Amino acid sequence: MTSIGIIGAGQIGTAIARALARSGISATIANSRGPESLEPLVAELGDTIAAGTVAEAAQKKIVFVAVNWSRLAELFATLPDFNGRIVVDTNNPIEAPLFKPFDLGGVPSSEIVAGLARGARLVKAFNHLQAELLAGDPQAEGGRRVLFYSGDDAGAKADVAATIERLGFAGIDLGALAVGARLAEFPGGPLPAQNLVRFG
């Protein structure tokens, strides 16, 4: 079974951990404050979710990165080359809680993240749906909630798509990062916060 790490235990990182736990999928979650700070969360989520260090989470085959935009460069500077492992970019170029957008000069945020995550096969996903919907039941209105993803590596996208399916969501491939990341990026893209359902 593919090993999974989550770096970041804010709203999105925690929501992803809850979705994985609900589906019985094992993962290691980490934050900057250390494993001890996550003990209440992992006790709540059960045996499939473990607390670890950032370095431990970053060694997994699929690594979800869900930290504040302003801290991404610092985070990736502390991590070694990913050597072809998959990084799932769940981030948006905003700073909570004010949701102040960063001026990226027209460059898609995932292009910046791809440059920071040395040696990673990057997939953009899990950034367009609100945290409570990610953590909740993927079944809705007689169908499945949609999760968009995009990337330039077909194998990496296939692995992320398989994870999305295991979680019970309906994955939709938006194509290459240059196209899909712009569509799903907040702010600016047309797809963020769209709670869509696929039938059949």
Image (cartoon, grey):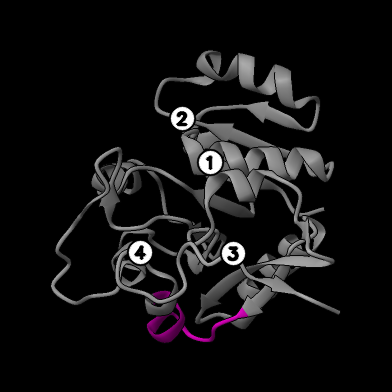
Where is mark 3, residue-wise?
195
Taking the magenta stretch, the answer to whether it contains residue 180 is: yes
Give the mark, 1 or 4, whose residue is nearer the N terminus. Answer: 1
Q: Nearer the viewer, mark 2 or mark 1?
A: 1
Q: Quadrant of residue 184?
A: bottom left
In the rendered structure, which amino acid carries the disc numbered 1? Gly
In the rendered structure, which amino acid carries the disc numbered 3? Asn
State the mark number for residue 191: none
- Given contact means CB atoms under 8 Å apart, are the residues at marks 2 and 1 in contact? yes
State the mark number for residue 186: 4
Distance, label 4 to label 3, CA atoms, is: 14 Å
Q: What residue is drawn where x is 30% and y is 72%? A: 188
State the extent of the magenta-drawn residues as a range.
173-181
In the rendered structure, which amino acid carries the disc numbered 4? Phe
Q: Is residue 108 left or right of residue 39?
A: left
Label 4: how many residues lie within 10 Å, few (<14), some (14-19) or many (20+)?
many
Q: Nearer the viewer, residue 88 or 134?
A: 134
- Secondary structure state at the residue bearing disc 4: loop
Where is mark 2, residue-wise?
31
Q: Is residue 64 above or below residue 148?
A: above
Where is mark 1, residue-wise?
13
Q: What residue is drawn where x is 81% and y is 77%? A: 199
Q: Is residue 80 visible?
A: yes
Q: Is residue 84 above or below residue 182?
A: above
The C terminus, quarter of image: bottom right
